Amino acid sequence: MSGIDQTQINANVDHAEIDKFSALAHKWWDKDSEFKPLHDINPLRLFFINRHASLKNKTVLDVGCGGGILTEAMAHYGTKQTMGIDMAEKSLKIAKLHALETQTNNVNYRLISVEDLAAEMPAAFDVLTCMEMLEHVPDPATVIRACAKLVKPGGWVFLSTLNRNIKSYLQAIVAAEHLLRLVPKGTHDHKRFITPAELARMCRTAGLITADSKGLTYNPITRQYRFTDRLDVNYMLACRVGC
Ligand code: SAH
């Protein structure tokens, strides 16, 4: 591989972001911690993923897996194998320990960038998830291209992120970080949020066909998330790799 490619690949990791997640790594599985929102949305996103891609016996990759909240839950659906990758080593240690504790044998974790894994294992996976991670990387389009490369033709890619508008600023930054303190201040940078039109364009360029989209909405009174057809704050896409 050429030196230029390697430079570009390594440049697509924001180390300040990785450090933020590493500092909290011991809390990944504490459902009352800063990671509570991820635990709360997990049943909804699992339902969405499994409804489209039917996880049983599938080979699955979770990109930006953190402590393995989604990775391990997908493995429990009877996947053939589920791999989680992240650039935060501490998070991966927690993920591995948790899988040991829960005796989840069909899961493994690796410290590798999605771009490097795409070069190593093209078209190796039936299903790929990349959730709540794109808004933390300098160049999400490159991540999406790598995701598309990792999946077999006809396979599924699930992406989630935050829309960029006034409402998402008020909800995801002002309310979630400052008023309700659901996540630590500075968790998100509004400039990095991605509109559905931008995400759809990145997907198309990567050869992905969007099959479905759903928004998630949070009710601060009931403290519950539910699906919505509006993509104005948290949203996810289900895409297929073109044949
Ligand atoms: N996908 C998980 C965790 C989301 S938090 C979930 O939804 O439950 C965002 C994660 O992205 C963190 O674990 C962080 O370490 C990871 N991350 C940020 N930049 C990354 C990069 N360039 N490559 C891989 N992982 C990255």
Image: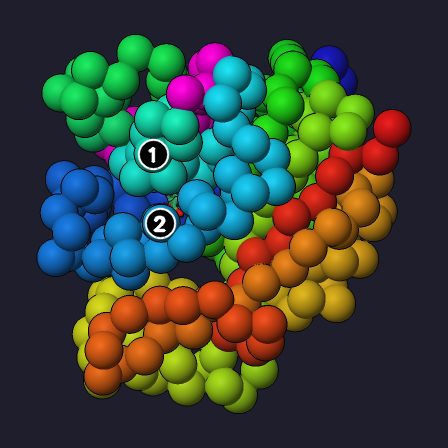
Instruction: Name the residue: 73% across, 22% down.
Output: 152
Image coords of residue 75 (percent x, y): 38, 25
Q: Quadrant of residue 40?
A: bottom left
Query: Vertical placement of 167 versus 9: above or below?
Result: below
| Residue 137 visible here | no
Instruction: Name the residue: 26% across, 18% down.
Output: 104
Quarter of the rendered image showing ligand 1: top left
- In the image, 116 versus 148, the foreground residue is 148
| Residue 124 visible here | yes
Quadrant (top left, top right, bottom left, bottom right) of the N terminus? top right
Tell me the residue that label 1 is attached to.
73
The magenta span reads 78-93
Q: CA distance from mark 1 to mark 2?
A: 8 Å
Image coords of residue 176 (percent x, y): 30, 75
Tell me the residue that label 2 is attached to.
42
Q: Is residue 209 left or right of residue 42?
A: right
